[in-house]
Image (cartoon, rainbow, N blue to C red):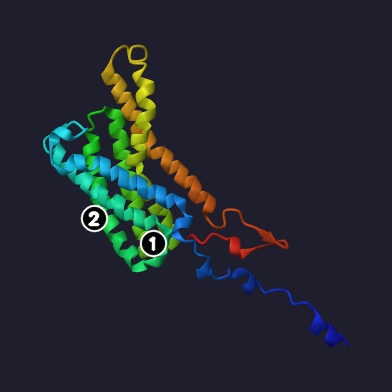
């Protein structure tokens, strides 16, 4: 009788079983068209390249929007734009979840192009050019900070991939590509500060258009990469597994623990 009761008694789930997360099902992957942000991002990349890149394809210094501040400035600027274009286009496919999961080998190869043929040379050139910015010291400091962070996040992501810490790799590469695309958000801030500061030339800047332009460029350059980076960091923090650990029956559910090392 007692043995029958023990046999029929419910068996508590083992700790090993509770700590093993269910394997993700391949059928649950969302199709590419269910992620509208990828379409918007692709449109922004194409629009930016169609509007900005042709200005430098003819190698005409008269068409540049950035005045030269030292000999060879224009050559370095064109080289930076070329490498940044490689980073912008290849990086789009790197952050596109559908492409990354469906074409893993292409993801690895494009990742090498993104890092070695895009970000690293573009960031180094950006630091050299930005340090001699014609728009004042605040813009120069912003450019140097941006180039250092851009390079650092990319190298950290590459190092995490080599060490097979893929969760950290994805986070660092999201930060890297956000900084890559900051050139677009930088342009958008011009539509905000241009009209606002332009209407105050005679009051705030006492008629000095140079002071107004330096202030406008400083604001757009700083906000162009700090705001997107803060938003990206908040998004990464929100989706990071284990940020809020759950408890089940008074014990910690190991499935909620962070996977990051």
Report x, y in % for residue 158: 34, 58
Residue 156, given in percent of the width and then of the height, sits at: 36, 55
Residue sitting at x 26%, y 40%: 51
- Quadrant that contains the N terminus: bottom right
Q: Quadrant of residue 199?
A: top left
Q: Secondary structure at mark 1?
A: helix
Residue 6 visible in the shown view: yes
Left or right, 226 with respect to 77, comes to right
- In the rendered view, would you say 93 is above or below 79? below
Q: Is residue 77 visible?
A: no
Q: Residues within 10 Å of mark 2 (few under 14, many from 20)?
A: some
Identify the residue at the far front of this view: 33
Furthest-left residue in this view: 71
Give the residue displayed 26% in from the left and 28% down from the top.
Answer: 135
Residue 142 falls left or right of residue 35: left
Residue on which the image places disc 1: 99
Q: Residue at x 33, y 26 (%)?
A: 216
* Cα distance in 3D space between marks 2 and 1: 20 Å
The percent coordinates of residue 136 (x first, y second) are 27, 27
Residue bearing mark 2: 117
Location of residue 252 (image quadrant): bottom right
Q: Taking 113 as reference, is 101 left or right?
A: right
Q: Is residue 194 above or below residue 109?
A: above
Mark identifier at residue 123: none
- Mark closest to the chain's N terminus, 2 or 1: 1
Element on which disc 2 rests: helix
Q: Residues within 10 Å of mark 1 (few under 14, many from 20)?
A: some
């Amino acid at each position: 009788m007692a043995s029958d009761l023990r046999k029929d008694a419910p068996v508590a789930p083992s700790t090993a079983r509770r700590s093993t997360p269910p394997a993700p099902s391949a059928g649950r992957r969302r199709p590419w068209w269910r992620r509208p942000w990828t379409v918007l991002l692709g449109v922004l990349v194409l629009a930016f390249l169609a509007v900005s890149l042709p200005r430098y394809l003819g190698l005409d210094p008269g068409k540049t929007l950035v005045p030269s501040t030292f000999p060879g400035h224009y050559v370095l600027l064109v080289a930076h734009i070329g490498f940044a274009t490689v980073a912008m286009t290849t990086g789009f496919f790197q952050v596109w979840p559908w492409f990354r999961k469906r074409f893993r080998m292409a993801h690895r190869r494009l990742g090498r192009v993104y890092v070695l043929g895009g970000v690293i040379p573009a960031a180094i050139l950006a630091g050299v050019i930005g340090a001699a910015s014609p728009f004042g010291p605040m813009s120069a400091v912003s450019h140097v900070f941006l180039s250092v962070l851009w390079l650092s996040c990319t190298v950290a992501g590459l190092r995490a991939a080599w060490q097979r810490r893929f969760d950290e790799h994805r986070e660092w590469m999201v930060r890297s590509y956000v900084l890559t695309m900051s050139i677009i958000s930088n342009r958008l801030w011009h539509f905000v500060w241009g009209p606002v500061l332009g209407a105050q030339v005679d009051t705030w800047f006492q008629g000095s258009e140079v002071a107004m332009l330096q202030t406008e460029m400083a604001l757009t350059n700083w906000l162009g990469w700090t705001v997107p980076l803060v938003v990206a960091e908040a998004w990464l923090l929100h989706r990071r597994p284990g940020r809020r650990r759950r408890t089940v029956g008074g014990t910690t559910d190991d499935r909620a623990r962070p996977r990051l090392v």
